[in-house]
Amino acid sequence: MSILDELRYPRRWYTKLITVILALIFFAALSTVVIAGVLTYWIVKPQRTSSEINMESFPGRPDEVEFTAPGLKPADRKGWFFPGLRGAPTIVLCHGYQSSRGELLTLVSALQDHQYNVFVFDFAAHGANDGVTTFGYRESDEVRAAIDVLAKRNDVDPTRFGLWGYNLGAYAALREAERDSRVRALVLDSVYDYPKQMVRIGVEKTGVGGFPLMVKSAQMTFEWLNYAHKDDPPLSSRLKQLVGVPILFIQATDDPELGAITREMFLKASEPREQAIIAHGNFVNLPDDEKRAYENRVVSFFLTRLPISDTILAPPPSKSAKPAH
């Protein structure tokens, strides 16, 4: 009891020192938790930018397509469908964190010019959409919902889809591909294995990642917000399910953290796999010459790995041909 009394009403110098240290530790821990919570909120609810275009005047004759996903209100998602050759495969482009569909239009044009159907849309908390990002957990459901709607069209091949994604979009694309046999080819730019890895990067970019337990506290807050996915395995543990599905991994040297994770994912993937190492990441911010080279690399991959069907390209029978008996 004397020890407890001394801690409660410190009279000796060393118990006073211990009390001060404990108080400092408590307030430091409390401050870390509060700051981490605020940071996590900022990270999962990024500033949104509108990406509206004039559908009537925009090249490529896009159609607006509405779809729903679990947890979304009816018709709460709208995407742009750019038609290619009738019956051709469809490439779904999945934008990155803090980006939007409107920033991918040059890549859309490059793919549409080669007769692919192309579809782009905004994830939750991006573009015109409200909500918060889950860094891929629920976003993969949005990709699935988009594919389901597109597969019902009579002008696409309902069994052949390609996916391109950057960081957030790459995670969502890979997560969907691992459970959807309609996905026949993948381009993964700066992909990660766990959503909490993006939380770490977000905290570090604020400049406070070096504070003790700051990153860990933010990751724990994010995992608490996404408790339903607490038992989800890393994507790399299911890469073997994609045997036979071609994957192009794009690794940027100026993004060492995601670059290292992307390389690890590449090494764990099954054949056929390809790797492209580029100097600068984030496609939407590349200078024009690098952007064209990037687009050419992506288009070349899909032309080789997800070619337009020979039966689609075959010319119609001649009118003078004799009917078969």
Image (cartoon, grey):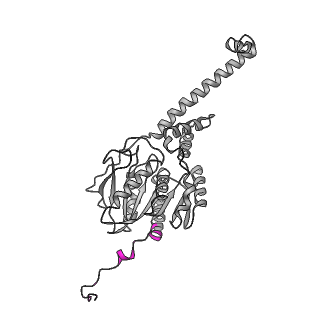
Which residue does the image show at 50% across and 32% down from the upper left? 38
Which residue does the image show at 58% across and 57% down from the upper left? 265
Q: Quadrant of the C terminus?
A: bottom left
Could you say which quadrant of the image residue 18 lies in? Answer: top right
Q: Is residue 324 magenta-colored? A: yes
Q: Is residue 230 above or below residue 15?
A: below
Q: Is residue 239 magenta-colored? A: no
Query: Is residue 306 visible to us here?
Result: yes
273 or 181: nearer the viewer: 181
Q: Is residue 150 above or below residue 75?
A: below
Q: Position of residue 21 (x, y in %)?
A: 68, 22
The single residue placed furthest to the front in the displayed view is 1
Q: Position of residue 185 (x, y in %)?
A: 47, 64
Query: Is residue 286 visible to us here?
Result: no
The magenta-colored residue range is 302-325
Could you say which quadrant of the image residue 208 lies in? Answer: top right
180 or 266: nearer the viewer: 180
Which residue does the image show at 48% across and 61% down from the upper left? 186
Q: Position of residue 57 (x, y in %)?
A: 26, 56
Could you say which quadrant of the image residue 2 lies in? Answer: top right
257 or 65: nearer the viewer: 65
Q: Quadrant of the N terminus?
A: top right
Q: Position of residue 119 (x, y in %)?
A: 37, 58
